[in-house]
Amino acid sequence: MKNIKKIRSITELEQTIAHEVQKTKSQTKPILTVSAGTCGRARGSMKVIGSLEKVIKKENLEDKVQIKVTGCHGFCEAEPNIILQPQDIFYQKVEPKDAKDIVLSTVLENRILDRLLYLESATEIKALNENEITFYKKQKRVVLGDNALIDPTDIHDYLSTGGYSALGQVLSEGDPESVIKRVKRSGLRGRGGAGFPTGRKWDFARRAKGDSKYIICNADEGDPGAYMDRSLMEGNPHRVLEGMIIGAYAIGAQEGYIYIRDEYPLALRHITLAIAQAEQMGLLGKNILGSGFNLSIHISKGAGAFVCGEETALIASVEGKVGEPRQRPPFPAVKGLWKKPTNINNVETWANIPIIIQKGPEWFSQIGTNGSKGTKIFSLVGKINNTGLVEVPMGITLKEIIFDIGGGIPDDREFKAVQTGGPSGGCIPKEKLDLPIDYESLTQAGSIMGSGGMIVMDEKTCMVDIAKFFLNFLRDESCGKCLSCREGTQRMWEIVKDISEGKGKNGDLELLESLALAVKDASMCGLGQTAANPVLSTLRYFKEEYEDHIKHKKCPALVCKEIVSSPCQYICPIDQEASVYIALIAQEKFEEALKIIIKDNPLPSVCGRVCHHPCENVCRAGESGEPIAIRSLKRFIMDWALEKGYQPHINQQRSDNNTKIAIIGAGPAGLTAGYLLNQKGYAVTIFESLSVLGGLLAIGIPEHRLPKALLNSDIENIIQSGVHIETNRALGRDFSIDDLFQKGYKAVFIATGAHQPMKLNISGENAKGVIQAMDLLKSVNLGEDVKLGERIGIIGGGNAAIDAARVSIRNKKCKKATILYRRTRKEMPAFEEEIESALEEGVDIQFLVAPIKVLTQSGKVAGVECIRMKLGDLDSSGRRRPIPIEGSEFEVELDTLIPAIGERPDISFLGDKSQLKISKWGTVEADNESLLTSREGVFAGGDVVTGPKTVVEAIAAGKAAAESIDKYLTGKRMDKEYKLNRPSIYVEPVELTEEEIEKATRPKMPKLKPQARQHNFKEVELGLTKEIAIKEARRCLRCELETEEGKMAIGWKK
Amino acid sequence: MNVETQKVKELIEKHKSQRRALIAILQDIQAEFNYLPPESLRFVSETLNIPLIDIMGVATFYRSFSLEPRGKHLVTVCMGTACHVRGGLKILDEFEKKLNIRPGETTQDGHFSLETVACLGCCAIGPVVVVDDDYYAQTNIRKVDSIIKKYMKKEKKNEEHKKN
């Protein structure tokens, strides 16, 4: 940086500014502007700069290419980023190894490096510069925009953007009162959080009596999640200083302080340097620019106390005391620092002043809404794709910020709430996304503007946990002066903590609310007065979530550790203790692992093959790697047991309870209910209408996925335990419900499933050659002869469609099997592993295709007319719906068409006299908890009630039915009891080797080679070997050991 | 006057022995000694004529001060809202487990101290962990191990140096 010459007059200042502006305009050297705020540096910008310098030196370009190190450009997600001038190219996520290419290709040869361009996820087009990036397009960066132009360590750079010309203008006018008038007219309100009109505040300070006055810049920025002040201080410190000097002049202050928090070392360095340079240039000190105005600015460092963001606490801290707020009035404008009139403003407020002077208050007041003028910088963080600092005009909607600028929620998750205003603010739910942002509207919605932190939350965020988080923060930061705040935040935290641990009681919510209102009412400063906001706003919009924690001991977002324990067990519909049997596998205790599995699961071999593994979807190992292969580990144990000839231990208690129970349907729900009721000593008979047992397990899922031998071994265990099953006995055809009760059955459980396929409802659907997937699979599974053609088309995207396709391609006649699905692969409901296997076997899948009509020739299928689909605009939940592309119709030649778009229960067997209430979707209505239907003594569960769901959910229905029927028959209440999710035993953890910690990954399931699968139904997945199973089991994070109970059980010292 | 007290004297004089500079003086002492030694507080009390109880009040009010010697490496885990939403608590748990200390404590060998901070203002790269002056972005459970190892290696090297 060149020497700083002292400027002694306003004219000289104007000349210097003009000179710097001109110099920059006429600059022809290529410039590489690197974003290097704290975050950028944490991501490696300094290393990038180092690499660039090396390359430039090597190529002897030191005088020809300039590297400019600036503060942050606001698009944190893209950092480290570089803006190349004069081409105006924006490179993102730059790494040191890119340096050579950037200099040699782009700078010297004007060749663009495609890989470094930002990719717009919405359009899938690469953006060349900021103007093409949606993140930037909707912003109005009047304050933050200059960050990209300025080297914050060189005051001349600030001058080159016209900096300090506003100061020059103000001093040459010589009319401090008019400055205040202009600030008033602009409508600027404090940006620190309270939003008090700035001009009015300056007026109070000006009019106050006092021989010495002070200005203060509040750079404490304590709100977690807010960092716009840091960005301004790091990237454009002179802008803040200029605002302060103008303000001090207007008010009549001769000394100023910048109170900056301890945790911002880079900002501190830059502002300290800026002050020194301003002094050297004569813009601070005595007789500034010959105007007779004196001002010196000092730095006062915070020492880690959130409450010091409150103005009276801040003042106490500057005075060297404990940061306790005091009563107001008197306000600091009248009696502030050392009891003198003091004007405190936030960093962003000060930074707005120069542009209000330069462009005039009318220009400023045209931006924004009636009550809230100008722009506001928000820090958009949390569960959002484009994290960064966004500066927008007041009045823009939350939806635009989150979905347009922010790019929506990562991983396509659902938006849940956005928290604004820090610990003094509240959470705003998705119903209020159209809210225009201004001070008043946010307050009405139960939040506040605050300093501008905007923390986006998705479905995996627990609102009870968020309330607990903020209360923990506030009780820690409470200065302790007021009983209501000191005790109140502590007690509120304790209540919410109990709720989050499953210890909540009735009456807690009412107590919480009344406590919150008392704290709000009786506290002296802003911290206490707003401490209740996070609690009150989450209660307002998410009361159900609190009630779930209290009444059901459930955390829907799976966050609260004491409630969830191990998420695999928590989410399992049948409460399988996955982490326990996995821990036992890790120790080679296979027999004990088997016992854990079968105690909760009467169809374990089946589940080990075909369960949809909700456990794996919530496995915590999957959050920073791959989930544990839980289903494969279960399968490993079941295969081991089969090999060893293990008979599951069955407790055959025969009490003299001969109460008869009838179960209709030998599918997973019926078999489970039958098994469990028999264990309890009841005399159970299962009536199955087909000649085979297992329901869809037998006639739906093909052999190559679930070998009949395995299914039958599970069913044989159940029969061996004493359950009596009669085949070829159909309810409706052979007997009625009345008959059963007449014959002495005391309870009936209907579990007939959902086997009736849904029609496509397009013309030609009844032609020859159209065969429903359900019918095809049933025939193949029963060993019947099936006539399929050569070119087979399957409509649908679920497991039935994939099953039908894989069965088709095994048929000797089939030359080609094509699945036609109306959405994209990402949205296909079929198991990912099934889709992969189908593709391996040569099945063709066409996405974004929907059938319009079946083409026939002489009554036989000749093809299907389809239309192409595209994903439409984002709807209110942030997802894209498929819409047809007009004029894109095309034909697919086929001789067999297999619809597989869903199933419904066939309840025609019930007739008119069953007395069972039927829903509008054709399912049997049954109570959620007790499974009781509208008829006394008749229960129903599984797909016949819910519509098509999964195997394990059917087993869960069977379990629930058994519990419920037992309670019913013994005169107990059929309410569900809610217990905390806990394992039955705590197994010692294993010690992982270093190599394991770093390198262990999820094993791939070994499969039959595709050639070996042709034309046969051999099982495709081959199972893990013992060594691999043990290795994988060791990778488990053992989440159940993280609860207090778990920690104590294995002797963890805490 | 011993070496430490001499140093404290210099720090007080650097701030022109002003009572109002108490917090700044304590910050300098903290930076110099890695904590606030009780003797230094007594000295400040006598020199600036501030009751020791008031100085203790300030020293215990502000989070950045420590009355116990801090470890060679200060691990600071950010507990701000954005980091929390991204799983910051798990990172803290993992450090607690691996170092076997709670926030505010120092390991037996004096190598590590663990602290939490309400927000570092680096929300975009959360969860954030700072060790000494090094910022770690997007930390996860696996990275915790490698972070601790990195500084353990440093300490081993230092010890070997000392031996030689």
Image (spheres, rainbow, N blue to C red):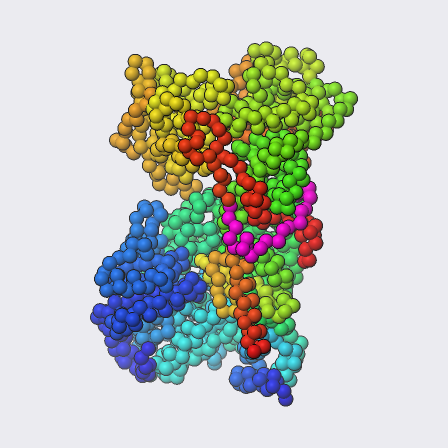
Q: Is residue A712 above or below residue A71?
A: above
Looking at the rendered image, the quarter that the C terminus of chain A falls into is: bottom right
Quarter of the image for the N terminus of chain A: give it: bottom left
- Please state if A790 lies on the left or on the right of A333 as rendered: left
What main secondary structure does the magenta stretch of the protein show? loop
Residue A62: give x, y in percent of width and height: 28, 73
Q: Quadrant of residue A432?
A: top left
Residue A989 on the magenta span: yes
The residue shown at (40%, 51%) is: A406
Viewer-side residue, A313 vs A46: A46
In the rendered image, is residue B147 in sight?
yes
Q: Which residues are magenta?
A: A979-1002
Classify residue A524 as left or right of residue A9. Answer: right
At a point 30% along the width and 24% down the height, the residue shown is A893
The answer to whether residue A927 is visible is: no
Percent from the top left, x then y, of residue B39? 65, 81
Q: Residue at x 37, y 82 (%)?
A: A280
Considering every residue shown, the one lying at the far top of the view is A734
State the count of labels: 0
Which picture quadrant has residue A611? top right
Foreground residue among A18 and B126: B126
Quarter of the view holding residue B157: bottom right
Is A379 inside the magenta-drawn segment? no
Q: Nearer the viewer, residue A463 or A565?
A: A565
For image coordinates 67% across by 22% down, the residue present is A723
Give x and y (percent) for residue A604: 60, 32
* Image coordinates for residue A955, horizontal then vertical, percent: 59, 30
View extreme (bottom): residue: B1
